[in-house]
Structure formats: C-alpha cells, structure tokens
Image (cartoon, helix red, strand yellow):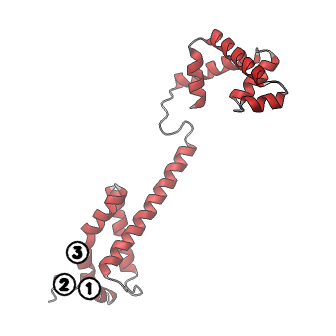
C-alpha cells in the first residue's frame, strides 16, 4: 500500500495525470486550507473563498490529462486561486456599480414614502415660486442653479453685466427665502442628493 503523504507534489501530480484518485485527495488535503486562507484574505467572504478553491480543484481534476505544470505544483495552485480571486473581486465590483446605478435612490437611500411626497410638494412649490419671478430674474436663476453656469457665462448669454446677474440671483434667493423660510436649505439638499 502506498504512503501518499510521503510523495512530493511532483510525484502526486504525475499520479494524478494517470487517474489516481488518491493522489488527488492527497493534493486536496495538503493545500485546501492554505488556498482557502489566501483567497479569504483577499475576498473577505468565506463562501466565495471556498467556491474559488473548489473551482480550482474541480478544474484540476477535469483537466488532469492535459495539464502540464512547468513550475512547482504548489505555485501553480496558489496562482490559480489568486487569479480566480482577482476575477471574483472584479465581478463583485461590476455588480456593485450596476446595482448602484440601477437602484432608484441608491443603496443607502433612507427615503420613505412620506419623505418622497413631502419632497414632491416642496419641489412643486419651489417651481411655482420660480415661475412667479420676473422673466429676466427667472432666466438668470435657472441658468445659475439648474444649468450650473457661472456669472460670466450667464452675463455673456443674456448680454447683461455680471453685476446684474449677481443682483438677479440675490433677488431670486431673497424671494424664495421669504416664501419658504428655513425650508429652502432642505429643498436644495434634497434636490442635490
């Protein structure tokens, strides 16, 4: 009876390519804990780390006849786990970015139904107040706050001075503050979230 524990990695891999299941079991027992530890250090998820190691060993068994290892078998296994771990990290990152883009209010949103209704009402009230501003004042305010243009750009577009732009914005903000009081800060915070 063979003492597989005494075989070198190279000898075990040679036996593996000859369909020796016991050599595979020995390799598995010899390296599973190390490979799991390496994957877990990078991925910080025990289930994913275990799956990665299992996949490496499954692939090793499936391709045992055609796999020729030119470096040390241990280095081969560690490298395979490292690449699979990096691929998993990349996939997880892509999934996280996708979720963040597709969730309506983002993953950390705390909006409740009441907050959404309140925001809609405040936004409607704000829109009505902006619509009630004098035409030139309204244009300047919209260019500044909604189109994010600076004073110089607004002045050039409307053919007015930068001081006039500043006066219109000041007048619009004073009107909004007068009608909305402390709610104006809350509205802008909500709109810019």
- Where residue 117 sits in the image (x, y, percent)? 58, 22
The residues tagged by marks 3 and 2 sit, at their Cα atoms, a distance apart of: 11 Å
- Where residue 150 sits in the image (x, y, percent)? 71, 31
Give left or right: position of 137 versus 105: right
- Where residue 176 sits in the image (x, y, percent)? 66, 14
Residue at the top extreme, as displayed? 178
The answer to whether the residues at label 1 and label 2 have Cβ atoms under 8 Å apart is: yes
Give left or right: position of 111 versus 12: right
Examine the image and state in which quarter residue 159 appears. top right
Q: Is residue 85 visible?
A: yes
Q: Which label number is shown at residue 65?
A: none
- Badge 2 is on which residue? 4
Q: Quadrant of the C terminus?
A: top right
Marks 3 and 2, the one that precedes in the sequence: 2
Marks 3 and 1, the one that precedes in the sequence: 1
Tell me the element at label 3: helix
- Badge 3 is on which residue? 30
Examine the image and state in which quarter residue 165 appears. top right
The answer to whether the residues at label 3 and label 1 have Cβ atoms under 8 Å apart is: no
Q: Say which residue appears at 25% left-offset and 67% top-offset.
A: 33
Tell me the element at label 1: helix
Tag in front: 3 or 2: 3
Marks 1 and 2, the one that precedes in the sequence: 2
Q: Which label number is shown at residue 12?
A: 1
């Amino acid at each position: 009876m063979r003492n597989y524990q005494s075989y070198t990695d190279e000898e075990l891999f040679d036996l593996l390519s000859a369909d020796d299941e016991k050599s595979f079991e020995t390799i598995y027992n010899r390296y599973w804990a190390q490979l799991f530890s390496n994957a877990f250090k990078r991925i910080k998820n025990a289930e994913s780390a275990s799956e990665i190691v299992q996949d490496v060993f499954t692939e090793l068994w499936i391709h045992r006849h055609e796999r020729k290892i030119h470096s040390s078998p241990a280095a081969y296994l560690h490298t395979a786990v490292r690449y699979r771990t990096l691929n998993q990290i990349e996939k997880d990152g892509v999934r996280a970015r996708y979720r963040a883009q597709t969730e309506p209010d983002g993953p950390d949103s705390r909006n409740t139904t009441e907050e959404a209704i309140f925001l809609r009402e405040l936004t409607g009230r704000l829109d009505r107040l902006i619509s009630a501003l004098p035409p030139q004042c309204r244009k300047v305010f919209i260019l500044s706050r909604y189109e994010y243009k600076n004073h110089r750009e607004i002045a050039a577009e409307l053919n007015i001075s930068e001081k006039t732009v500043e006066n219109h914005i000041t007048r619009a903000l004073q009107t909004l503050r007068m009608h909305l009081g402390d709610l104006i800060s809350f509205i802008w915070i909500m709109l810019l979230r």
